[in-house]
Image (cartoon, rainbow, N blue to C red):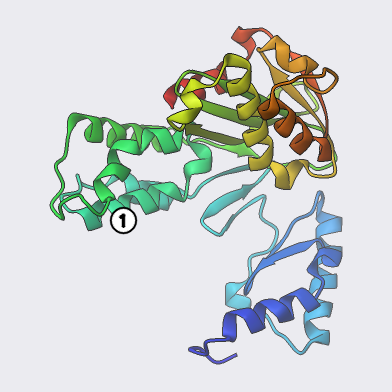
Amino acid sequence: MPFGLATAPSSFARMMRQLKLAECGSVSFFDDILVSSVGWEEHLKSLDKLLTRLGEFGLTARPTKVEVGFQEIEFLGHMIGMGKMRPVDKKVTKILKLETPRTKRQVRALVGLAGYYRRYIPGFSQLMVPLTELTKKNKPAKVQWTDQCETAFQTVKQRLSEQPAVALPDFDRPFTVRTDASGTGIAGVLMQTDDEGHIHPVMYASRKLLDRETRYSAIERECLALVWAIDKFSRYLTGRYFVVETDHRPLTYLQRSKTTNSRLMRWALALQEYQFSVMPICGTDNLEADILSRLG
């Protein structure tokens, strides 16, 4: 397909959908195709199916652009393999070498570059507030770099330098969602348990409370955190049974109790499309979500 055509991306994406790559154990993002398998024999079969399918549609793969037989491979700026996903080292190194931004344009570039790896940094949105404030329209082109900005800048660098990783979702296993709310923010963590009983994070999410939300009662804030987190993780949870763990015991009665609180009733109705159970846990077992909510 020639470069420069306005309709090229949509046309190519439509053609890739016609290949039905899922039948070949593959996924694609435009012209990038990833084949994943459990074992070597299965991998060879998937590759054979993929290459046969490409041939049927008159497509070819350039040998110099093909990598075969790796336990871990770079895909869309992430290193994926062995059940985990982590940032690409060279991308992280680029962020670590960034100098202090002096202009609004440089701050935007920093926020955008670091934001690509936000899924690895708990509380990223709240952490970056001092920097995102500098990019607002009413702020000068030459930024006023404060101690809070420097702290956020260095903290992001430190978090990425620790080689963070999240588990790849396994849709043959149940998911667990932990949520929490504080007076300033709400948060959730999507997790799964491996064969050895170890719990691994799949995705973090958190945000600050809006001004009106800070005046909610405790159970309303906790329920807001639950509804917001489930919606955030809906691509993983829709159509699947999962468990919600919370240290706020009244939430365990939300599904089976009658309430006159219209806000809680509205949220309870919104959750009816999901299949889940609410399990109470100790606050000390909910540290991830608790810390994220307080970062808000």
Instruction: Give the residue pinned by disc 1.
Output: 109
Looking at the image, how many numbered discs can be counted on the residues?
A: 1
Q: Nearer the viewer, residue 173 or 287?
A: 287
Q: Residue at x 71, y 43 (%)?
A: 234
Q: Nearer the viewer, residue 165 or 248?
A: 248
Left or right of residue 104, residue 184 in this image: right
Q: Residue at x 55, y 59 (%)?
A: 76
Q: Position of residue 203 (x, y in %)?
A: 61, 37
Q: Residues within 10 Å of mark 1 (few under 14, many from 20)?
A: few
Can you say whether 40 is above or below 194 in the image?
below
Left or right of residue 147, residue 128 in this image: right
Q: Position of residue 56 (x, y in %)?
A: 83, 86
Is residue 14 among what the camera can see?
A: yes
Q: Position of residue 284 (x, y in %)?
A: 60, 8
Q: Secondary structure at mark 1?
A: helix
Can you say whether 209 is above or below 12 in the image?
above
